[in-house]
Amino acid sequence: MEGTAGTALTARGLTRDFRGFRAVDQVDLTVAAGSVHALVGPNGAGKTTLFNLLTGFLAPTAGRIELGGRDITGLPPERVARLGVARSFQITSLFPQQTARTHVELALQGATRLGWRFWRSDRLLARFSARAGELLDLVGLADAADVAAGSLAYGRKRALELAIALALDPQVLLLDEPTAGMGLEDVERTVELIAAVRDGRTVVLVEHNMRVVGQLADTVTVLQAGKVLVEGPYEQVRADPRVIEAYLGSVDAAH
Ligand SMILES: Nc1ncnc2c1ncn2[C@@H]1O[C@H](COP(=O)(O)OP(=O)(O)OP(=O)(O)O)[C@@H](O)[C@H]1O
């Protein structure tokens, strides 16, 4: 599929300064439609800042972002989301008292533009409820639909966040360190989950775990000090002496 459907997301000369410090420096990125594209690099390389730029959470100092050929530079996050880019967060953002099902139903409601009006319609409500059930099933939470999000184990909270992101039915799904803080079993489950939900969409992920990158990514972009250091298929990038050098001396070398 990669390449045949063209480009999902591009950045050209993307730059972001924080009070004179250049966190993202003239980044060019081409994310092929239907691909899984990983952003990696040592701590402080600019991965999170790049993510925030791509999703409208930060405005670029310079450069341009296109989604399927449409200029989305400077659009606010909710507009970017409505155009088909959903993201998950590194830090959990759930309401502890609300059930898993309620979270997904609210996300589905938010995706419709109908606002609260839909509550008047039993038909729509039933549709959301059915779709919420499907999404919870997809992420392996069918048995936890009526459990309060706060009581879910860490890996299952992350799965719920993925279901929430999928409620937008995004063309492009951005995942910020989807396996961070997980034990081996949850990492494996998450890899399977991402492999399942990538079907029919494009996935961009920031990921420190190189095994996960190797299992999922079609293309890997390595960032260092805000710049693109190397880009290519995982095996090629992994063996690149510039990448090995960038990781040596970094705490990430152990991952
Ligand atoms: N709001 C901000 N104000 C000032 N400096 C910032 C801000 N956000 C990020 N930076 C700086 O920009 C650089 C890149 O940070 P960023 O979080 O994007 O890196 P990262 O690659 O995601 O790192 P990590 O792997 O540790 O999450 C860092 O030096 C960071 O201190």
Image (cartoon, grey):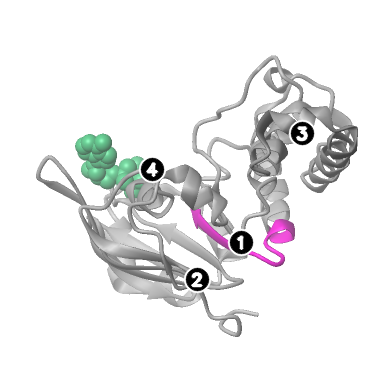
Image quadrant of ligand 1? top left
Task: Give, as a single range, the part of the protein colored magenta.
Answer: 195-206
Q: Gap in Å between the C-alphas at discs 2 and 1?
A: 10 Å
User: Which amino acid, mark 4?
Assistant: Phe
Q: Which residue is mark 1?
A: 171
Estimate how packed mark 1 is, as few (under 14), some (14 to 19) or many (20 or more) residues with alpha carbons within 10 Å: many
Q: Gap in Å between the C-alphas at discs 4 and 2?
A: 19 Å
User: Which amino acid, mark 2?
Assistant: Gly
Question: What's the mark number on residue 118?
Answer: 3
**Residue 9 vertical placement versus 110 (above, below):** below
Q: Is residue 28 visible?
A: yes
Q: Is residue 251 visible?
A: no
Callout 2 secondary element: loop
> Where does residue 67 sit, x and y in percent of width and height?
47, 65
Q: Which residue is mark 2?
A: 68
Q: Residue at x 70, y 60 (%)?
A: 195
Callout 3 secondary element: helix
Callout 4 secondary element: loop
**Residue 195 vertical placement versus 253 (above, below):** below
Q: Is residue 184 left or right of residue 241?
A: right
Q: Quadrant of the N terminus?
A: bottom right
Q: Residue at x 48, y 48 (%)?
A: 79
Q: Residue at x 54, y 35 (%)?
A: 181
